[in-house]
Image (tube, rainbow, N blue to C red):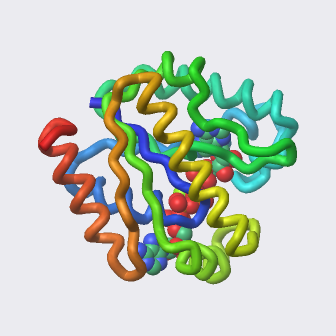
Amino acid sequence: MRVIIGGIPGVGKTTVLNGLKSSGIRVENYGDVMLSEARERGLVQTRDEIRKLPVQIQKEIQVVAARKLSSLSDVVIDTHFSVVTNSGYLPGLPYSILTILNPHLLISIEADPLEIFERRRRDSDRKRDHDSLEKIRQHLEANRSYGFSYSAFTGAPLLIVLNEDGKADEATRKIADIIGNGGTQ
Ligand code: ATP
Ligand code: AMP
Ligand code: MG
């Protein structure tokens, strides 16, 4: 089963999915694949520079990453349903990418906007954008809307999972349960 997980930066996707690895579920990070391609092309040094590249280049690298990930059939992919670029929201899974990846289940990871704001502020490992609460709210809304569109395109159900402060393990468990049940309950 191929599961695609999206959520806005700092919502806690990677934290929540790290907890899945111990149950033997394969997790791949779309950004890792884009980063290695962008580095090979000499375009960036860090993952937080990718969204600042010209949109056309991001789209090219996005397709390369999808092709590489498409060889995996049992996988959970950690990605973004929409990326804030200098030209506006870029869909993380436009139709061309959805047809390559063909997900069976989509999961939107969400959290309280203030908690996301604080997580970004505290996270010194990354070069995060310190957006206003209003901008975080708008991106959460965009993320969920894109998720519903992807669901409508593919017929894959969209599950919304809340990653509450201090409760990442609960979100992990919810995801592990649904994947363990083959994506349905
Ligand atoms: P990106 O899309 O930029 O990779 P992400 O969604 O993968 O972001 P993480 O890197 O997993 O986000 O988490 C961002 C920060 O929030 C990290 O410092 C992490 O430790 C913290 N965090 C994640 N989930 C929780 C939680 N439930 N409670 C408290 N802190 C959390
Ligand atoms: P992450 O570590 O998840 O933030 O991934 C690093 C970067 O890769 C993100 O900040 C985006 O710029 C980019 N990225 C990840 N997934 C996608 C996607 N589906 N489409 C476009 N860019 C993406
Ligand atoms: Mg991450």
Q: In the image, residue 171 lies at what x, y percent?
A: 31, 64
Residue at coordinates 57% horizontally, 73% vertically from top-left?
113
Q: Where is residue 155 in the image (x, y as percent from the top left)?
A: 35, 24
Q: Which of 34 and 164 is in front in this view?
A: 164
Q: Picture quarter containing residue 170? A: bottom left
From the viewer's perspective, tell me whether residue 159 is left or right of residue 134. Answer: left
Quadrant location of the C terminus in the rendered image: top left
Q: Which residue is drawn at 38% across and 65% down?
A: 162
Image position of 45 with respect to 18: above or below = above
What residue is rendered at 75% in x and 34% in y? 58
Estimate the x, y position of residue 127 in percent, counting from the top left.
74, 66
Whether residue 47 is visible here, answered yes or no, is: yes
Check the picture and name the quadrant holding the N terminus. Answer: top left
Q: For the point 63% across and 44% down, which residue is it?
A: 82
Q: Is residue 123 above or below residue 52?
A: below
- Quarter of the displayed picture in which ligand 3 can be seen: bottom right
Q: In the displayed structure, does residue 89 sit left or right of residue 55?
A: left
Return the x and y of residue 161 as percentages of the image width and height: 35, 58
